[in-house]
Structure formats: structure tokens, C-alpha cells
């Protein structure tokens, strides 16, 4: 209990941030006013976290790593994401769909070059590795690895670790790449169907990631998508795009499902029961 009370202040800051940012993102397509609001929110919360580190010390490396990796890291990646998104919206061409598609492709290629340059860290993030966390997420004197980012507005050596900015940038760019793909697909659909896509009415998965994983694997083993030729990665990517969600290590989640002590198909059982009840209503 004592540890929780010591850290309660920055946990509250983080939880408050998540509530507000999810509310903003849940509104669908964001205009520049909402993007600016999100940026101000991120900066405010980072400022509060910085104040916390000035007034408090971490009891051990584990606490310090958790702070910079999870709590600060999540807010920082959103700040980078929304700042990049603002630049995209301000520079986005309006003359033709071809110009828009070319612009999106250029932005995607720029992100892919960044990923290629920092491939070792991209893999570290993708595989949820932790063996270098002490090096990456604890405060140390500046060195060359920290200066890789070269972001002049994030250069406080008392609040930025060796790699927290760079790793946050990788995560932010992954989120940005998903956004660019979604917008490109919307343009493709516009060309195909001849009508605008209402990006303001985005569907959101409001269940748990475990429940969605159950559904994805059920469709996969049923072989009802592409005659059974679509793999888990392809199916999960489509669901991520459809429901505006990022699935964290779907393979590990499925492994956890397999070793449940109770029902291994809890979500599927529930929706089956709900569907049967709905069908029975029509005959009452």
C-alpha cells in the first residue's frame, strides 16, 4: 500500500490523461482545433510528470523504468503523434486525389526510412523485449545514443533517458503509419465507389483485446476468410484498421486464452447466448 500511495500522484496524472485522450480520439476525425487541444493536454501532463521527478526520487531501478517506459512514454508518444498529425493536416494538398495519394505515400516512405535506420529498436519494441530497459529507461548522462533523435524541443537531460524519446517516436510513427494507411484506403474507396467516406464515423472496438482475439482466431480456424488462406496477421490487421485498435501481441494473448482455467471460449459463448436470446425474442 505504501508504494502505491507514494506513486499515486503520477498514476492519477496518467489515468486522467488516458481518460481525456480516449475521449478526444473517440470523436472520430480530428480537426486542427482538436489536435491542438490534444497537444496542449500532452504537454501539460508531461510538465506535471517532470515536476513529480523534481520533487520525488525513485526507490529503485524498477520504479524508474516503469515511470519512463509506461507512464511518461505513453504521453510522450501521443505528443509526438499529434504534433506530426498537425503538420500533415497543415500541409495536406486539396487540389486532387492524386496529389493527396502522392503526399501520403511520401510521408509513409519517410516513416519507413526512419524505421529502417533504427531497425534494432523497432524490433525491440515489436517483440516487447525488456533486457535493455535499464539502459533505455533510466536517467544517465548524455551520450551519442541519446542524441540520435536530435529533437531540440525534447532535450532536458534531467527528464529524458537514453532512449525514451526515440522509442516513443517509433511507437508514435507506427500509430501515424496506421492513420496514413486508413486515409489512403479512404481515397481508394472514394475513387472506386464515387462517394466520400465519412471518416468521422469510425467504428471502435469497446470490448477487451482478449475478446477480439477470440473472435479473430475463431474466424481464422473456421477458414471463412479468403477460403482459409488468410493468416492471423492479415485478419488481425484488418480488424485493427476497422475498429481503430492496436492489438498487443495477439499470439501471446491467444496462448493465455488456451490456458484459462475455466472456459477457453468465454467471449464466443457469451455472444452465442446473446444471439440465441435475441432470436427467441422474435418468436415470443
Image (cartoon, rainbow, N blue to C red):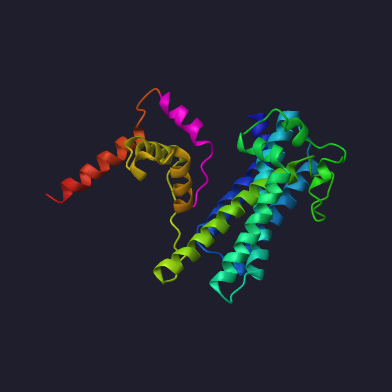
> Would residue 268 be found to the left or right of residue 139 on screen?
left
Q: Residue at position x 61%, y 49% from top?
A: 174
Query: Does residue 283 appear in the picture of this structure?
Result: yes
Quick one: which residue is furthest to the left in this view? 284
Question: What stretch of residues is rendered in magenta?
Answer: 244-260
What is the x, y in percent for residue 89? 63, 67
Q: Which of 59 and 278 is in front in this view?
A: 278
The quadrant in which the N terminus is found is top right
> Would residue 198 be found to the left or right of residue 70 on screen?
left
Instruction: Judge whether 8 appears above or below 257 on screen.
Output: below
Instruction: Judge whether 20 appears above or below 267 on screen.
Output: below
Q: Which of 200 and 125 is in front in this view?
A: 125
Q: Residue at position x 74%, y 42% from top?
A: 164
Residue 253 shown in magenta: yes
What is the x, y in percent for residue 48? 73, 50
What is the x, y in percent for residue 257? 43, 29
Q: Residue at position x 44%, y 53% from top?
A: 242
Residue 188 shown in magenta: no
Q: Residue at position x 26%, y 43% from top?
A: 274
Q: Which of 93 and 43 is in front in this view?
A: 93
Query: Does residue 197 appear in the picture of this structure?
Result: no
In which quarter of the view is residue 101 placed?
A: bottom right
Quick one: which residue is furthest to the bottom in this view? 95
Instruction: Judge whether 180 appears above or below 224 on screen.
Output: below
Disc count in the image?
Answer: 0
What is the x, y in percent for residue 62? 71, 29
Q: Which of 177 and 158 is in front in this view?
A: 177
Amino acid at each position: 500500500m505504501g508504494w502505491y500511495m507514494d506513486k499515486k500522484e503520477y498514476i492519477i496524472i496518467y489515468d486522467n490523461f488516458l481518460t481525456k485522450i480516449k475521449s478526444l480520439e473517440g470523436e472520430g476525425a480530428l480537426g486542427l482545433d482538436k489536435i491542438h487541444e490534444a497537444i496542449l493536454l500532452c504537454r501539460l501532463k508531461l510538465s506535471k510528470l517532470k515536476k513529480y521527478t523534481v520533487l520525488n526520487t525513485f526507490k529503485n531501478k524498477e520504479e524508474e523504468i516503469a515511470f519512463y517506459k509506461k507512464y511518461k512514454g505513453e504521453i510522450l508518444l501521443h505528443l509526438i503523434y499529434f504534433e506530426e498529425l498537425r503538420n500533415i493536416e497543415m500541409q495536406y494538398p486539396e487540389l486532387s486525389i492524386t496529389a493527396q495519394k502522392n503526399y501520403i505515400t511520401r510521408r509513409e516512405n519517410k516513416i519507413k526510412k526512419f524505421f529502417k535506420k533504427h531497425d534494432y529498436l523497432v524490433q525491440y519494441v515489436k517483440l516487447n523485449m525488456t533486457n535493455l530497459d535499464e539502459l533505455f529507461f533510466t536517467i544517465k548522462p548524455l551520450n551519442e545514443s541519446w542524441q540520435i533523435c536530435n529533437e531540440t524541443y525534447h532535450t532536458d537531460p534531467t527528464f529524458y533517458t537514453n532512449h525514451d524519446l526515440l522509442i516513443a517516436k517509433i511507437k508514435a510513427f507506427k500509430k501515424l503509419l496506421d492513420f496514413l494507411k486508413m486515409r489512403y484506403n479512404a481515397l481508394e474507396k472514394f475513387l472506386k465507389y464515387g462517394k466520400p467516406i465519412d471518416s468521422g464515423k469510425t467504428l471502435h472496438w469497446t470490448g477487451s483485446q482478449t475478446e477480439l482475439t477470440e473472435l479473430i482466431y475463431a474466424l481464422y480456424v473456421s477458414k471463412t476468410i479468403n477460403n482459409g488462406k488468410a493468416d492471423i496477421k492479415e485478419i488481425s490487421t484488418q480488424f485493427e484498421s476497422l475498429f481503430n485498435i492496436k492489438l498487443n501481441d495477439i499470439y501471446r494473448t491467444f496462448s493465455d486464452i488456451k490456458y484459462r482455467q475455466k472456459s477457453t471460449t468465454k467471449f464466443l459463448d457469451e455472444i452465442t447466448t446473446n444471439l440465441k436470446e435475441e432470436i427467441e425474442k422474435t418468436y415470443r
